[in-house]
Each structure stands twice: as structure tokens, then as C-alpha cells.
Image (cartoon, grey):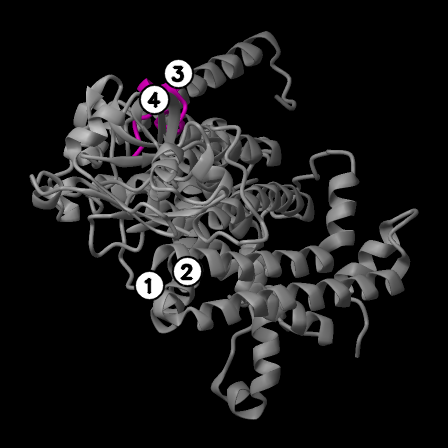
């Protein structure tokens, strides 16, 4: 055992540091942290799995972003009606499943944080700097996503904007990391999956103390990570996949629990619209680029509400349900008001202080025969929590843009 | 200065064909680094541009804080638990205990905000509708039930193989 003395420290701090981190007897040496499980192959397999999950999240996330921040030159399809329900369900499922994969991956590479010397050449420096957006970004994306579906906001920033821009940072870091690790990953993944000889006992991890088979093998760890991801999926996916509803013990919403047996994200009371939504003075205004502006009361709307459609409502937070809606076709209202053919529309809510007060419909969405201002849900009149007297429901749209308590349609 | 990373050079030596050698690795490294950092810069620019929504100082606290909490608190804690498991759990069932601990940890981490009920909204009957403490208990019960079953099977298999064949050897 070589001990560090005060004299050593005074004489050459750099040499001392080097000895501390490279001498096997010293605490900072990497040796004690290594486990036979911590190898390139495990890192590559977990990295590949995480890369696939994050890419799925990124693409489906961009699709959701495009719905909420439409681009005039890139219309989003409103058909199939269940497309957004599928993509957003996949986004949340993949994000939840990446929790154990991310933690396992970080566990495998963690000793590299204490490796010495940290940088041997310029490429090492570039790669090391890139690890910060990679690791911090990955942790942030999974943490903020899971907190958001639990509707837990311990921060002051706006979740959608922060999650969206950090996704670019994280994906950029993954791209650079992939380039830096390409050959190693290829070699590690291509090699026949033989378990490395577990000859060295490991006092820290206890992987191989007295026998070869003690502790998890690589395959055992991968099975455990897959089992964790599978368990989290099984215990939450019932919030969007009806047949597994009874297994959804850890889902933040139940597709059959809520007002009228259906969940909502924001109730009428919490939106501050209880009084205005039930007022006798309620009118729906149809204004903007029209020749005959309309102001319709409830009786007139009820008389027009004859069209029915079965459409899903899919929240960005991953829960969804399909229901039978009855109401007024938006395109009939546009015709009634004398809107030009191919007009777009903004639908405005009574809810005053919400970033989702106004919802935009492009030409196809506004004229889709199933885009309704609904008065009924599953055959019963809407209750205030579901957006009474009138809510927007259209095919293939995120729940946040299916505006409730509609009071105005502005034709563009 | 601009050599390929040392790891990459080692990797090249092990590859029989393809990959493009060190020169190819060097080009790939710098091209993907440039593209990756371009995308990172786009993200950072967007974050600063939309600063009213993203609140960069607060966001930075969570991004940096998350990494620090993982590296300095969570990861060492896992190491300590690993040491304790290695000391306390007999080798024959250690893998099963490690596996059950990992699954339990993931379930507990995920359900933490649900169990604490941070997101519960008053006046909304669909907000966090379950008893998540009880549900997590049920899920953990199933995990440890399965683990116990596997451990019993492992112990039985071991004792049977020992009684049939007294020679020491790999299980």
C-alpha cells in the first residue's frame, strides 16, 4: 500500500494526482469501480436501445410540436383520425421505457467520469465536452417528461418549450456521440455474444466474489432492464390502450374515471369558466373574413347539432379515449356565415388565461366533415368539465387543441 | 493534434474490414461533431430566443442539477447498495435480488410524483384517480413474489444438482 504523504503533496501536486488516479492502491483509481459487466458491449447495447427510444420520442415529439405550432407550408394530416393518438401514445410509452435504459447506461459508463487523465488529445476534449449535453440532456428529457405526465411542475419554465428545445440539444449530442463511438459500438455489437471471462473478483459491485455465476450476468442485467421497461409500460399503457386499463396501476389518468366517466385535464372550475359557460347570455360568434357574421344562442346551436362522429381525444400527456360526439359541423357554420371556400379558422375559448385559449384549424381541418363543435358526448349533453356548452373536436388533433368552452370562431 | 480518439484507433485494429481506418474514423468524428454541435447550437439558440417560455436560468438549474444529482448522489448510492447486496446476499440468489432491486427502484422512481400527489388538482375528479401508494405496493409485491419464487427454484435446482452430482463444477 503506498500512502500519500504531505511531502508528496508539496513537491509535485500533478504527479501526486496522477499517482492517486493510476495507482491501483489509491482510492481514485478506476479499478475499484470496474465490474465485469461494465464493458463496451453492454454500453453499446444499452446505447443503441436508448438511441432508438430517444429517436422515436424525438420524431413523435416533432409531430406533436407541428400540430401545436403549425407551419403554413407544412399542413398536418387530419386523417387517419387516430394518428395523433398513436404517435403521442408511442411518445409517452417510449419516454417512460427509456427510464431504466438510461439509468443502466449511465451506470455502465459512470466510472469514466473519474478516469484520469480525462483528456489525451483534442478529440477527447471535444468528446468530453459533448458528454455534458448528452448526459444532462438525457436525464432532463426523461425527468421532465415523467414529471409532466404526473402534472408535477417543480420548475418555473414552460414545459413544452423547454422540453422541445432541450430535445434538439440532446439529439445533437447523441449524433456527435454516435460518430465518436461508431467503430467501438460496431465492434462491440458485431462480436459474438460471448460472456467475458469473469475471473476477477470485484469488491465494490460484488459481481464475482467467490463464484463465476454469482450476481447478474450481462444477459441478466439486460433482461432486468427490459423487465423494468416492460413493467413500467404494462402499468401505464392502459391509460391509452383500453384492453390493459385494469393493469394501469401507475397511470396518471384512467380513461373511464372523470366527469361523465371520462377524464379531463382541466375542469371548468379550475379554468374559471363555471359562470360564463352556464350564462344565459352565452352566444357563439362567427366573425372575421365572412359576409354574414353570426351570433347564435344555445337553442339555435342545439337545432343545428345533428351530425355525429366517433373520434378519439388524445392528450399530449399520453392518455386517450374514443367517444361518440354529436354537434354542429364547423364547415356548416362557415357556410352559414358566408366564409370563402378554403377558409381557415381560429376557435376561441371562454377560458381567459390559457396558452391554449385559441386553436387554429387549417383548410382541411376546418372543412373536414367530422370537425364538430360538439354539444353531446356519448349521447348525453356535455357537462361543463368537458367543455359545455360547446367544444371543438376534430380528427387527428392533440387534446390541447380540442378547445373547450368555445365562444367564437374567427374565419381567416 | 487531430488524431482519432485512442479508443477508435484500438477499435480499428480489431476490425477486419470496413470502417475506413483511422482516417475514416477521424473524418467521421469531426463531421458528426460539427453536425451534432450545429444541432445543439440550434437548440440553445431556440431556448434563448424563447426565453419568456423557457426561462433559461431556471431551466439551467434543472438541467445541471439533474446531472449533478445523478452523478454525485444517485450513482454513488447505487454503488453503496451494490456493495451491501454483495456482502449480505448469498451468491446463489444474489442475481435475483439485484434484479428485483433494479425493477423496484425503477418503479419507485417513476411513481414518486404520483405517490406524493404533487399533481393532484382539486375540483377535478379525474386528476390522479388511483391510490398510488397502494398500487405501488401491489406492483412491488408482485416483483418480490416473483423474485422469491425464482429464488426458491434456484435453491432447489442447486440442491438437487448437488445431491445427484457431488463433483464441484459450473451450475
- Neighbour tally class for label 4: few under 14, some 14-19, many 20 plus, Cα within 10 Å: some
Secondary structure type for disc 2: helix
Residue identifier under label 1: A157
Distance between mark 2 and mark 3 Cα atoms: 34 Å
Is A138 left, or right, of A30 in this rendering?
left
Q: Position of residue A188 (x, y in %)?
A: 74, 44
User: Residue A307's mark?
Assistant: 4
Q: CA distance from mark 4 to mark 2?
A: 40 Å
Residue that badge 2 annotates? A162
Q: Residues within 10 Å of mark 2 (few under 14, many from 20)?
A: many
* Chain containing mark 3: A
The stretch of residues the image draws in magenta is A237-252
Task: In this rendered view, identify the residue nearer to me: B143 or A16.
Answer: B143
Nearer the observer, A25 or A171:
A171
Q: Is residue B10 left or right of residue A8?
A: right
Chain assignment, label 1: A
Asked whether the residues under marks 1 and 3 belong to the same chain, the reply is: yes
Q: Is residue A318 above or below residue A166?
A: above
User: Callout 4: residue from which chain?
Assistant: A
Q: Which residue is mark 3?
A: A243
x and y percent of residue A50 in the render?
Answer: 57, 44
Amino acid at each position: 500500500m503506498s500512502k500519500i504523504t504531505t511531502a508528496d503533496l508539496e513537491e509535485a501536486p500533478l504527479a501526486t494526482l496522477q499517482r492517486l488516479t493510476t495507482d491501483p492502491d489509491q482510492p481514485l483509481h478506476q479499478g475499484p469501480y470496474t465490474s465485469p459487466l461494465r464493458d463496451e458491449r453492454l454500453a453499446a447495447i444499452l446505447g443503441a436501445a436508448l438511441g432508438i427510444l430517444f429517436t422515436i420520442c424525438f420524431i413523435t415529439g416533432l409531430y406533436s410540436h407541428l400540430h401545436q405550432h403549425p407551419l403554413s407550408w407544412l399542413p398536418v394530416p387530419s386523417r387517419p383520425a387516430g394518428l395523433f393518438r398513436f404517435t403521442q401514445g408511442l411518445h409517452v410509452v417510449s419516454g417512460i421505457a427509456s427510464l431504466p435504459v438510461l439509468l443502466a447506461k449511465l451506470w455502465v459508463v459512470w466510472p469514466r467520469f473519474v478516469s484520469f487523465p480525462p483528456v489525451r488529445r483534442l478529440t477527447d476534449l471535444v468528446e468530453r465536452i459533448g458528454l455534458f449535453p448528452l448526459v444532462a440532456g438525457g436525464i432532463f428529457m426523461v425527468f421532465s417528461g415523467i414529471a409532466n405526465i404526473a402534472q408535477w411542475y417543480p420548475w418555473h419554465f414552460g414545459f413544452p418549450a423547454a422540453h422541445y428545445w432541450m430535445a434538439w440539444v440532446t439529439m445533437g449530442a447523441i449524433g456527435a456521440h454516435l460518430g465518436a463511438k461508431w467503430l467501438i459500438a460496431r465492434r462491440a455489437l458485431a462480436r459474438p455474444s460471448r460472456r467475458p471471462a469473469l475471473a476477477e473478483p470485484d469488491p465494490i459491485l460484488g459481481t464475482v466474489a467467490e463464484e463465476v455465476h454469482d450476481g447478474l450476468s450481462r444477459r441478466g442485467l439486460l433482461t432486468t432492464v427490459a423487465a423494468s421497461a416492460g413493467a413500467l409500460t404494462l402499468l401505464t399503457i392502459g391509460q391509452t390502450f383500453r384492453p390493459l386499463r385494469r393493469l394501469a396501476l401507475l397511470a396518471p389518468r384512467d380513461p373511464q374515471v372523470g366527469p361523465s366517466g371520462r377524464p379531463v385535464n382541466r375542469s371548468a372550475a379550475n379554468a374559471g369558466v363555471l359562470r360564463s359557460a352556464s350564462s344565459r347570455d352565452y352566444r357563439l360568434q362567427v366573425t372575421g373574413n365572412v359576409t354574414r357574421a353570426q351570433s347564435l344562442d344555445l337553442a339555435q346551436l342545439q337545432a343545428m347539432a345533428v351530425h355525429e362522429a366517433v373520434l378519439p381525444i388524445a392528450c399530449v400527456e399520453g392518455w386517450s379515449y374514443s367517444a361518440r360526439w354529436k354537434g354542429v359541423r364547423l364547415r356548416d357554420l362557415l357556410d352559414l356565415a358566408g366564409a370563402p371556400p378554403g377558409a381557415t379558422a381560429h376557435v376561441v375559448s371562454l377560458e381567459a388565461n390559457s396558452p391554449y385559449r385559441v386553436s387554429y384549424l387549417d383548410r382541411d381541418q376546418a372543412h373536414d366533415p367530422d370537425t364538430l363543435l360538439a354539444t353531446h358526448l356519448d349521447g348525453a349533453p356535455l357537462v361543463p368539465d368537458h367543455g359545455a356548452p360547446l367544444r371543438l373536436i376534430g380528427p387527428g388533433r392533440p387534446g390541447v387543441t380540442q378547445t373547450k368552452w368555445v365562444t367564437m370562431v374567427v374565419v381567416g | 493534434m487531430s488524431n482519432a480518439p485512442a479508443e477508435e484507433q484500438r477499435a480499428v485494429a480489431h476490425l477486419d474490414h470496413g470502417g475506413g481506418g483511422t482516417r475514416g474514423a477521424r473524418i467521421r468524428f469531426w463531421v458528426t461533431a460539427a453536425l451534432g454541435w450545429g444541432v445543439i447550437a440550434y437548440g440553445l439558440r431556440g431556448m434563448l430566443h424563447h426565453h419568456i417560455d423557457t426561462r433559461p436560468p431556471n431551466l439551467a438549474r434543472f438541467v445541471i442539477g439533474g446531472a449533478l444529482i445523478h452523478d454525485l448522489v444517485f450513482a454513488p448510492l447505487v454503488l453503496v447498495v451494490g456493495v451491501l447486496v454483495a456482502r449480505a446476499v448469498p451468491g446463489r440468489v444474489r442475481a435475483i435480488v439485484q434484479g428485483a432491486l433494479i425493477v423496484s427502484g425503477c418503479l419507485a422512481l417513476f411513481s414518486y410524483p404520483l405517490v406524493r400527489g404533487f399533481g393532484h388538482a382539486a375540483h377535478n375528479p379525474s386528476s390522479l384517480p388511483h391510490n398510488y401508494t397502494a398500487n405501488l405496493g401491489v406492483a412491488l409485491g408482485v416483483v418480490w413474489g416473483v423474485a422469491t419464487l425464482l429464488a426458491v427454484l434456484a435453491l432447489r435446482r442447486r440442491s438437487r444438482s448437488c445431491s445427484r452430482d457431488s463433483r464441484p463444477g459450473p451450475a
